[in-house]
Every structure is written in structure tokens, then in C-alpha cells.
Amino acid sequence: MTAALRFDPIRLPPECETLRKEVRAFLAEEIAAGTFDPHSPQGGDNDVPGFSKRVGERGWIGMTWPKKYGGHERSFLERYVVTEEMRVANAPTRRFFVADRQSGPVLLKYAPEHIKMEILPRICRGEVCFSIGMSEPNSGSDLFAAKTKATKTDGGWLINGTKIWTSSAQVANYMLAIFRTSPPTKENRRHGLTQFLVDMKTPGIKVNPIAQLTGKSEFNEVVFQDAFVADDHMLGEKDGAWKQATSELAYERSGPERFLETYYVLTELVRALGEEPDNRGAEGIGRLVAQLHTMRRMSVSVAGMLHAGKEPVVEASIVKDIGTIWEQQLPHRVRDLAAFVEPDASNHAILDTVLPFAMKVAPKLTIQGGTTEVLRGIIARGLGLR
Amino acid sequence: MRCKKTPHSDARRNRRAKRVRVKTGNAVAESENIVAETAEKIFADLADAQTINRDKKGGWKAPLWQALSEAGLPLSWVAEDCGGSGASLAEGFSVLSAAGRFAIAVPLAETMLAGWLLSQAKIASPDGAMTIAPASPKDRIALNADGTLSGRARGVPFARDARHIAVLAQGAGGFSIALVDATSCRIEAGLNLASDGSDTVTFNNVTPVAIKPAPKGFDQDSLMLMGAVARSLQIAGALESMLEISVRYSGERVAFEKKISKFQAVQHNLARLAGETAAAMAAASSAADTIANASGFDDAVFLEATAAKIRCAEAAEKGAAIAHQVHGAIGYTLEHILHRYTMRALAWRDDFGHESYWAVELGKRVAARGADELWPLVASR
């Protein structure tokens, strides 16, 4: 029998709507002050440390974490609202978003107490940036083929090898990485990798930026040469990273950032087509809005299930599969629908500037954070096919 | 005909008494399940797809309809004092999901919608199958000055099987809701993709059995949106079954010396089918939930209902194609049950507004609000 899919029609509670107003007011202030330009999607990637600190002051980083670590013990659904409002505004969240979404929760679960006390409050204050050391030159989707080695030494481990496609490594304070501590076993090829917290200032780490086709260089090659990591920076079970890496995925995969990355071109399409579009334009907008609304309802539903302590792993993978393909196709659909816009009119000026960038970003969306192929494998497993 | 003193009220009361209802405290979800479970049990007993598929004479229809009627399901949305069983909107919607999962081909959804429409004007529902006219936003039925009805409604589901038709008619003073004896209309038989009745009903100065003004604000969009959500739930249900039988078949069929479920290409197709099914379920259940909790047909209902119809129709197209691809030639035979689900899901797209029609309407509303109001609209749900 097929495992039953569940997408309960969960609504955000009233406190979320109060919070949404606060976030919108805050973002409007930041835009007015010139911190970022909402019509410039590249802004989301810019390094604006002052912005991170102000978001931290509002209590919008580490929102769901315990207060003793600087968190705010608010709900997962409240965090959802902050995330989607920031994303839609093209706010520069890159500096804190990885730590807020992924790294913090891993530390909460696996780091020793003194490290939690040291680092988590700084994340919440918007002071530290995290990167994730998963991919290697010959190990991408096949995470468990990683070869970068951690060799036991006095009081810690010596790291040797190379991580690649590491976003934000050039500005990150820390990396959460998996390194090989033992060879895989015959029975379990996933055995032998261990999760570590790495201070990026450690001697023996070299970050080499890699230019992307967008012209930016926000991902990197990170080379480790006898870089020392102390024993207490090992997270969780030795050789058991495979057990730890998968449980966080539902959080990582189902958020609003998984379908809103190119959202701005839809806004600009509506602006470009004007208040009275023809049937072709209206139908195009209608279908895109219906698809967007449906994905958001699916995503909120998964958030609600996570909030209720369930583990909707298959549902979360479905959200990312459908969401990333949608946000990837969106710039091209928008291009089609804007084909007959009057060339001399002024209402498509913003669209003209943002559409090329969206098209350049599009190819990565179905690769980062779990490729479409990997996700479909997870969904197939959920269906009982493997 | 008015509510409360109906000639069959005692019979109905007895019938209702047979039904198991939970009405304690905060047991909405629970009672929802019980109404849906009652429906599912009847469907499983009397609407088994294999049995129906083998029965070329339609002998399954009468016992199924009788059982559904005895359980009070066709008049789920009719209050007890109007001759129905007084189920909540949410309970009725869950019956429609189940009807979709079983690809039910008797006028259950239609009678439910007809009873619901009549109830808007407090007109009591008669016994027997009903349908609704118009069933397309493009058709209009006129209420003439002499109180008769004129006009033509196309694609009316199961009109030839209905004893009565619930009609939304437009007169000089606005919309009215009427109960019409089906024999007083001209009905030209037609078939939808699944070979279920999809008929043309012509009203030629027809005198209704009962007629009353529609409530304030209730117009043809209201009826079409309610119908669109019903069809969305049915499509989503049919997709759930397509997914289930496709997954099952992929684990039985052997090709190139292994089960086809072990081929990555097949796995990925099935994962996509799961995605389309999930999208349809989420869109339809969200829209149903919105109507069940709304006080009228407001902007929220419009967004949710149109989006559900659009997205479910898209899912039907993609999902049906994958289900057939997984089954290969056997799924293309009349003998196999797959077509019962795929053809109905595709046919249901046509009723109560083609998805392209609703996309244009939704797109126009979004455009009129302006670019910067799009996100607030999406985030409001």
C-alpha cells in the first residue's frame, strides 16, 4: 500500500499576522534607510552585517530556540512568516539564514553545552555566519562518497582535503562539515563520516572563490591542510553522521525559500502587463498565481506538521521538488507572457533589469540543497518503491 | 414547497436515526471522518471498480444509489428541517473526496450541490437524484416576468438521471433559486470523456415547482465556485487512487527481468505523480476548508476555489498521463480499471468552469489589484 500523503489545510494563527505586520514595517524602514533595494534580487546575497544585527535585535534569528541560548521560544510557524516576508522583499538574509535554518538546530542537538552557550547567542544576535561543508570535488549528491579526512591527533583532529561549492565560506565564521573518520563498511557505505564544527579562522584553511555564471562568486573551494579541530568540536556520534544529516532535511526542504527565489519576476510581470491585461496575459498570471498559492499552502501545511512534532519527510521533499522546478521555470514563463508588452512603456523597466538575473540563477535552483533526482529518490522510497 | 413540513419528514427522520453521528464538544474532525467513513464503506461494498467495470448493464447503480440515499448522503448539505441530513460543509466535502477516490459515477456530488443550492433559498429538497443548472459560467438561465424559466445549460452532469434540477436563474430583480421537475425540460443526452452523462438542458418557459430569491450577494460565481471546489476534491481523490494503483502495478509488472518499480525512470515518474497528487490534495482541501469557514463568497474563497480548480485540472492532465505511462498498454484497455479514474479526472476539469476560464478571471483580479498587492493576497491565505 502507498503511504498516505497528508497536506492538512493548516492556517497561520493570529499571532503570525501581528508578527507579519511588524516584519513588513521593519523592512519598509530598512528600505527607506537604503539598507537594500527590494527591486534588486542580488541584494539578498550582499554582505550587510548591520542588517543581520538589527534582525537579531528584533528577535527574528533563532526564533524557535530555547531562551537560555539566546533564542525566543516562538513557534515554527512564526519563523515561517519572517522567512517568507524577508524573501519576498529581497532582504539581505544570507549572512544569518544558514545558521538560523540549519546550523543552529544541529548545534542545539549535538554540540556540547559550553559550545552551545558560546555560539548560539551570537547567531541569535546576527553576529556570525555559517557555511556548510558537504560537497567535495568528486562527491556532490552522493554525500557519502566524501573523502576529506579527519585524523586523530592529541586533543583533536587534523583535517585534510577539499570541500567545494561552499556558499558564503569567504565570509563565514564557522563551517559545519562532514569529514571521513573511518572507511565505509561492507554492510553500510554511509558509515565512517563524522560531523564537525570548524572555526574558519583555523590555520590551514584556505578559501578560494569560484566565479559563477551570474558573475558573482558566492560559492567557494575550501582547502584543508592539517587544520586542527578540537575534540569538543566533534558533533554527535563518531562515524555516524549519516544518522544525523537526514533528520533535519524536512526543515531544510519545505520552507518558503524553496519556491520564492525568483518570485520578484512574477510581481514585475503583473506590473508590466498593467491593470487590464488581455486574456493571454490574464490566463498566464492566473495559472502562475494558482500554482504559487498551492505551493505555499503545501509548504505551510508541512510547517504546521513539523510544528506539531510530525516528520513529514516525503511531503517536504515533494514541496522542494515542485517548488524548485516552479521557481526555475518562472522566469521563462514570465518572459513568454511579457513578449507583447509595449516596448516604449515604462512599466516593464524593473522586469527588464531583474529577468536576466533570474534566468541566470534558475539552473542552480534544482541542484542546491538536494537535487531533483535525489528528492525523487526520497519520494520513491516513501512510496515503497525502493 | 417550503422547509420544515415536508411530506416525508418521518421517513427521513428514521433514516437519519440509522446514521452514526458524533456531536460532542470539539469533535469536528472526528465526525467528519465518520460521515466520510460511512460513504467509503458504501463505496467499497457497492462501487468496487472491478465489479463496475465488468458490469456492462449498469446493474450496480440502483443498489449503490439506494444505499447512499438510506445513509442520507445525497442530501448531506440539506438541513434536517429541509428534508436532508444536516451534515456540515466540511463533512460533505470529505464525502466528495471519497467519491473521487472511488471515481463514483452516480449523481452524488450533483445531488449534494443541488440540495445545497436549494437550501440557500430555504427550498426543501425532494427525494431522488438531482442535478444543477447552469453547470458552466457561460450559460445563463433567465427568470421571465411571468415566473417561468428560459435558457439552455450545456454540460449538465447526469441531467437524464435526475428527477429534479436545482436552477440558478437571473431575472430583472436579481438571482433566484428554483426547483424544477426534470421532465418539464428538454434534455439532449451527451457524454463526457468517461462516458458519464453530460447533457444539454433546455428550459422553454418552464414553470418551476418552487422558486425563491437567492440570498443577497449570491450569484452565478458563487454556484460555479462551489461546483469548482467539489470537482477539485473529486479530481484530487481520483489522483490518489491513480497513484495507489500505479505504485501497486509497478511492483507487480516484471520487464527486463525485474519489477518495473526498480527502474529509476519509473520511480521518478511515480514521484512526479505523487507530487501532482499532493498539489491537487492540498489545493482542493484548502479551498474546501476556506468555504467551510467563510461567511460568504469573498475574495479569499475566490482565490482558493479558482486556484484549486486550476491546479487540480493541471494535476489531472499530468497525473493521468503518468498513470497511463506506468501501466503501458494494459492501462489503455477497457478491461482495466485505470480509465475509470483517469478519464473522470480529465472530464471533471470541464465542469463549473474550464481551468483556463478561471485562470483568466483570477488573473484579471490580480492585475486589477496591482503588482504590489499580489504578495499580500497570497500571504493572506
Image: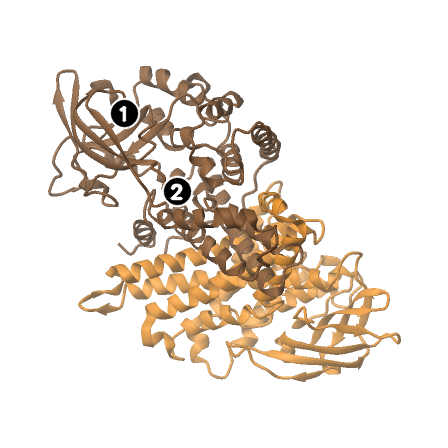
Chain colours: A brown, B orange
Give the residue number, with chain letter if any, for mark 1: A197
* Residue sitting nearer the eye, B26 or A357: A357
In x, y percent, where is residue A174? Answer: 31, 25
Residue under the point 41% across and 21% down: A127
In x, y percent, where is residue A371? Answer: 32, 48
Q: How many marks?
A: 2
The secondary structure type at the circle numbered 2 is: helix
Q: Which quadrant would the N terminus of chain A be assigned to in this image?
A: bottom left
Residue under the point 44% across and 58% down: B276
Q: Amino acid at mark 1?
A: Leu
Whether residue A8 appears in this view of the structure is no
Q: Is residue B309 above or below residue B195?
A: above
Calculate the distance from the C-alpha at mark 1 to the C-alpha at mark 2: 22 Å
Task: For label 1, count other residues whose C-alpha is less than 10 Å away and answer few (under 14), some (14-19) or many (20+).
Answer: many
In x, y percent, where is residue A138? Answer: 18, 43
Farthest residue to the right: give it. B146
Give the residue number, with chain letter if any, for mark 2: A253
Task: For label 2, count other residues whose C-alpha is less than 10 Å away and answer few (under 14), some (14-19) or many (20+).
Answer: many
Answer left or right for A273 relative to B101: right
The secondary structure type at the circle numbered 1 is: strand
Farthest residue to the front: give it. A344
* Residue sitting nearer the eye, A234 or A32: A32
Answer left or right for A194 relative to A283: left
Q: Is residue A157 above or below residue A386?
A: above
* Residue sitting nearer the eye, A166 or B351: A166
In x, y percent, where is residue B208? Answer: 80, 75
Q: Amino acid at mark 2?
A: Arg
Q: Chain of mark 2?
A: A
